[in-house]
Image (cartoon, helix red, strand yellow):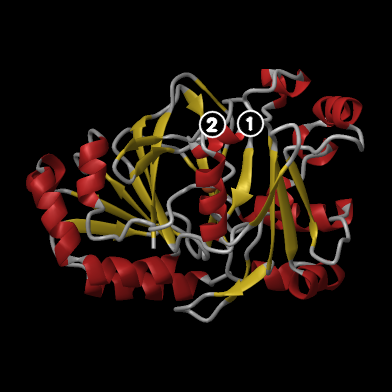
Amino acid sequence: MATVAASSQRLETARALFSGPVRLSEPYPGSPPLWIETDSDTLAGDMGAVTRWMADNYEAIEAALLSFGAIVWRGFPVHDTDHFISMMERFKPYAKGYAGGTSNRKAIKGPAMEATRTPPHVYIQLHQEMSYMPDNPCALAFYCKQAPESGGETVICDMRGLLEEIPETTRRKFEDYGARYVRNLRCADLDDWRADSELRHATWQYWFDSESREEVSAQLDERGTHHRWKEDGSLTFWNSEPAVTRHPATGDLLYFNQLNSQIQNAWTIGKERADLFDRLYGDHTDRPYAVAFDNGDPVTEEDYLAVRELFEARKIAFMWQAGDVMLLDNKLTAHGRHPFSGERDVQVMLFD
Ligand SMILES: [Fe+2]
């Protein structure tokens, strides 16, 4: 990780680049994010002024995103989805959209989506958005419309230097083998035991928001994944991807995959739930997710824990306040979510 001295240097560099009445700080030295607040009544009260400030400082924002991996705006008047969209209008929405993505989320308006419908008690492990797909967004932004009563922090993790810290035997598997992702979606027309909501085994109709097999096939072809329709109407799609990537702008070699966050066994979903899956699906029925190294080797508990421990040691838990906006470089900074109670309304946009 960057040293404190290096981080204050990057803060000084950022201060020289930004203009206008804003205060920049680095609350977790050496780690994302850059923190931007304002003392100005204009910027704190007028969204038009915020949008103009964003446009005037666009180059500074892009440079700071590469240097810090993430940026948080607090104290700006972002009260609804329209404000969020106008604040981010200089950023190009992710052209391929979220079709085929694994999080349960729906569009809200234009490029803004719900962050996720994953139940509140579930810890969403740190991951880089859609790193399991052939194509993925370069950046993403979250907006907190309503903070939950307790918990629900978005956790973030600096990915620079993480790969190098993975013990060599495990690291080599990620570097040499890559990842294979398989996903199975059941058919809504078939009323079988997999429809039990406890299993969260989604249907392809819900996932792709479509009743047309042809349309879904076309979307998957466009995405660059393989797929097969099975006799019972369910859909399986799969793809192989590298598990590390080089950042196009910084040149960093980075861990970039979702092997760890898509494994479904006792380590990740708890023994009780893993036993339920074993009992019901056994070896005879496709599970919602199946991931492995691309040479066919499973991710062992040792591999899993090596990565998870690094993620957990490096993570920052970001406590939301209503109106906060966070922009992340999708390769440099991973994100996840702590469990929560109460209403939580966090929205997301993906960018190219
Ligand atoms: Fe995500």
Residue 280 visible in the current orientation: yes
Residue 263 position, x and y percent, is 76, 46
Amino acid at dot 2: Tyr
Please tell me how many numbered marks the rendered image carries: 2
Residue 341 position, x and y percent, is 53, 21
Judged left or right of residue 4, residue 314 is right
Residue 317 visible in the current orientation: no
State whether residue 189 is above or below residue 214.
above
Residue 215 position, x and y percent, is 50, 45
Judged left or right of residue 64, residue 262 is right
State whether residue 163 is above or below residue 54.
below
- Taking the spot 62% from the left edge, 25% from the top edge, the residue there is 188
Residue 178 position, x and y percent, is 74, 68
Discs 1, 2 touching: Cβ within 8 Å? yes
Give me the disc on residue 202: 1
Mark 2, residue position: 206
* Helix, strand or loop at mark 1: loop
Q: Nearer the viewer, residue 88 or 222?
A: 222
